[in-house]
Image (cartoon, rainbow, N blue to C red):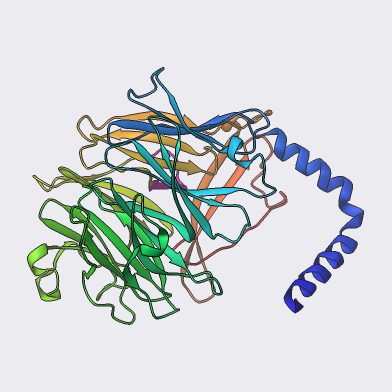
Amino acid sequence: PEILQQLEQENQYADTVLKHTEAAQKQLFEEIKGRIAKDDNSVPVRKGSYYYSNKVTGDNEYPVHLREKNFLGTDKQVILDVNELAKEHEFFSIGGLTISPDENLLAYGEDTLSRRIYTIKIKDLTTGEYLKDEIEGASSAIAWQNDNQAFYYIKKDPQTLLGYQVYRHVLGTAQASDELIYEETDSAYYTSLSKSKDGEQVYIWHSSTETSGVSVIDANNPKATAEAFYPKETGIEYSIAKLGDWYYIYTNYQAVNFRLMKVTAEEMHDRSKWVDVIPADDNTQLVDFELFDDHLVYEQRADGLSTVKVRQLSTGNEFPLEFNDTAFAAYLTSNYELDNSKVRIYYSSLTTPGTYYDFDLSTGEFELMKQTPVLGDFEADNYQSERIMVTARDGKQVPVSLVYRKDLFKKDGTNPIYQYGYGSYGST
């Protein structure tokens, strides 16, 4: 109650101090809103034999989730209309939309209280009807067992709201009979769930401020238990991805900027058997990676600027993806299948609105999938961006990104400047 009272007082104070700017606030709000398109469609993403997407239209506040057999086809199936679900609620949020391996059932979490405590529901996508199964007090993370008869979920502590118990629920049974698979006893850790790209394993992720780890469950075994990939070790972070007989390990073990290693399942518990794929680099941070049947695509950051590189695993040949802007952000997104011949990348810069590209791993060609429209009189060609290095007082080189309108920038020091500074997590 004391904290809420303090927040209310702060809000009242801010309203009083800024009252004379109300007209300007409204003008800015309307201008910003006027540049955002009401209708929006996501780029379809392949998962299994379907392409999944969502759309927001008109004055609807929530998306409609769709799927189709053919990319950008006409056979779209509505799998969930969140606007219909939200009609009877003052607050409504869903999360964790997860399709069963046979692609007939949709599991998702529903929050109507704004506490991120979800009720998991199961929808039959063939009939449109809901199963009687409902899981209360959960997070939105869900991972299916491969027999389509059960799924894993995380139970939340009602006081701390932390997810700390992983259960297996068998369809058609009561929640009270669900089997406890894992319990996190240290409240410093956050627990989450996912499934390997090949669908063979369920991962329980354990994350704290400076330590992380993962436990592995065989998704094909209805009686499987959770096995730690490698014991948690204070100060050491790692995550894994599976490709064939190999585990790829993203870790800061003896690597302040992270490295990528690999090991076979038989030797995963012996860290001396882990071998480098992308070695540690004191000047370059390894940010993310994605595996495909014969390719490794990874994101690095150096001097505050991100780059994406592609390596063919069978030959070792490697090259960076080239972009035109001098200051930009590029990262991997929505790459769910090992056999994809294309990798999806999100790209933006100070002069380029958010853009989705598909890069063809076979031909080396980019395909523009979507660019966020900016309404009004915005023309990207009217603007110029630059990236320079500035020497700070301590002698360190600090990257600075500049953007200006070409016809208004005088380059004589008389232009006003809006300055924003940030430096954390390797970003600037």
Tell me what residue is drawn at x 28 percent, y 31 percent: 49
- Residues 369 and 219: in front is 219
Residue 307, x across and y down, in percent: 35, 50
The region drawn magenta spans 323-331
Reply above or below: 86 against 417: above
Instruction: Kindly tell me whether residue 71 is visible in this rendering.
Output: yes
* Left or right of 64, for residue 106: left
Residue 397, x across and y down, in percent: 46, 66
Quarter holding residue 182:
bottom left
Tell me what residue is drawn at x 14 percent, y 73 percent: 269
Tell me what residue is drawn at x 71 percent, y 37 percent: 33
- Residues 390 and 141: in front is 141
Instruction: Kindly tell me whether residue 42 is visible in this rendering.
Output: no
Reply above or below: 214 against 299: below
Q: Is residue 95 magenta?
A: no
Residue 62, x across and y down, in percent: 60, 38
Quarter holding residue 187:
bottom left
